[in-house]
Amino acid sequence: MNFFTRIPLFSAKIITVFLYLLLAFWVLRKPKSFILEGAPAKKTWYDLRLWALILIGIQIVLYFIF
Amino acid sequence: MPVHFIDTFIIIFYMAAILIFGLFFRKYVSTTEDFFLAGKMLPWWVISFSIIGTNIGAYDYIGAAGGAFRFGIAQANYEWLGAIPAMIVSALIVIPYFWRNNVYTVPEYLGKRYQESVRTIEALIYGFFLVMLLGIFFWASGLMLHTYLGWPLKLSIVITAVIVGIYTITGGLAAVAVTDVVQLGVMFVGGISVAIIGFWKAGGVNEFFVKLSSTHPQHLKLFLPLDNPYYPWLGMIFGLGLVLSPAWWCANQAIIQRTLGARSEWDAKAGMLFAAFPKTLVPLLVILPGFFALMFASPSEISNPDQALPWVIKNLLPPGLAGLVFVAFIAALHSSVDSTLNSASTLWTRDIYQRFIRRQAPDRHYLFIGRVLTGCFVIFGVLLAPMTDKFPGIYVAMQNLLSFFQGPTLATLLLGILWWRSTKWGGFFGLTGGVASAVVMSLFRINFLYVAWWSFVVSVLINIIVSYLTLPEKPEKLRGLVYRFIERDKKAQEILRQKVEG
């Protein structure tokens, strides 16, 4: 644990943002056919990857601010 | 301080309206699928709001406001880092597998993927946990009515039990989900009203944050140093963000059940994903009151951080609005109680009764048992409620106990979905070994966030080692249950699509 106490607190933000970016990358790799399976229409707004990316974007902004 | 008659009227009106509204759904219940899965008719927006209604309890209001009062915005990690990524993973990895396999419970999926003993262990863990929670919820609800309205405590508990019990027994998941939507609406109206009044008293949003950052700069930091006993940043990221939160959002029956009642796979995924938007706003409801208390109350007025929210309601809000915020509390409790009741009934009926007591019976028999068990759990919860007062640490103890299981459960679930080589014995020993390691770690008084993380790691390692030491499962058994045999398998996709379309 001593090792970790020497890590600056700011790195927590960097790790968090990195994990969010990793998640965004994974979301983008999901095939469209899987995402839209059972969707009422094939319109852009039914693409759940877009919803997920908006959510991730909001989180990154919040973790940058605070 | 006497309660204004407008407040009393609002509270009684809410309770009567929610009962009548919930009862409306009884006519839609004629099979177990109607009762436990709302007839697989739920649209994504009902699922979304029901998930958040279930997730926010009255304890969260009081505890989170207290946490914000003491430590600041770090408390919001439970709503952001501790929820949003896990909800995305749940929506895009876990839920499609549950929904396509037409399971009623999370243990049912684990039983199909691994073996029946894994199903039984998981069902008993969550079945026991949910039933114990009911006593705590009923006690909290009764205590609120008793404290605020002056009604006798036992009568207050019984009133809550009767209202929620009646519509849950008659209307099943449909009544639970739709009343949750109304209850969430009430919570947000109440919470946003508090936010508006608080900002107005502070002289505006900008003024509020300028004052707060000058008087309590540490309160606007999401991550706190490692020596913080409650929110060490490493524990928040690895314990909460990577284990506890995914375990909650991927494996908690009370959360997952409404997605299993979705009318399509897309609705199930979209329901969970859209729920993350209101979840992002939850700190407005639960964190801001803590900050308002910090700003407006004198230090002598709040000796215990959990008094922050009651102080705000009592001192900042006018009559009518105080009643509305109180109704938001009651709504938060009701939405948690009804979901817990319905999920406990589903687990005990499907995973225990139907397998160990009466295997082959007509569907209407299981519907009857589901209702009887719901009624029994209501009575049990009422009888258990006073115990909460005798053992004040019971809620914390229950939460700590659950943290023993969450890491291993998540490891078993994720490996089961993502890794075709994980075998039935890998799953069994991974789960039990992980739980044993969590118990041992807790004996050394390690922070529960680290216990969750390391028990997850231990569980993954045991699962992998045992799986390589045992024979792989046959592809026929895994078809439709794991990533390799669903997403990459076009034939399986086609078969499942045909199956789903009936």
Image (cartoon, coloured by chain):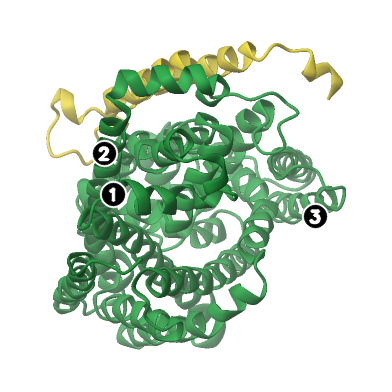
- Do the residues bearing badges 2 and 1 touch, measured as CB atoms within 8 Å? yes
Horizontally, residue B337 falls left or right of residue A15, namely left
Q: Which residue is mark 2?
A: B197
Q: Colour of chain A?
A: yellow
CA gap, disc 2 to disc 1?
7 Å
Residue drawn at 27 percent across, 56 percent down: B322
Q: Earlier in the sequence, mark 2 or mark 1?
A: 2
Mark yes or no: residue B478 visible.
Answer: no
| Most foreground residue, B312 or B66 | B312
Q: Secondary structure at mark 1?
A: loop
Residue B25 placement (x, y as % from top left):
17, 73
For label 1, count other residues whose C-alpha is less than 10 Å away and answer few (under 14), some (14-19) or many (20+). Answer: some
Q: Output the chain of dot 2.
A: B
For label 3, count other residues whose C-alpha is less than 10 Å away and answer few (under 14), some (14-19) or many (20+). Answer: some
- Residue type (three-letter) at the residue carrying disc 1: Leu
Q: Secondary structure at mark 2?
A: helix
In the picture, which quadrant includes the N terminus of chain B? bottom left
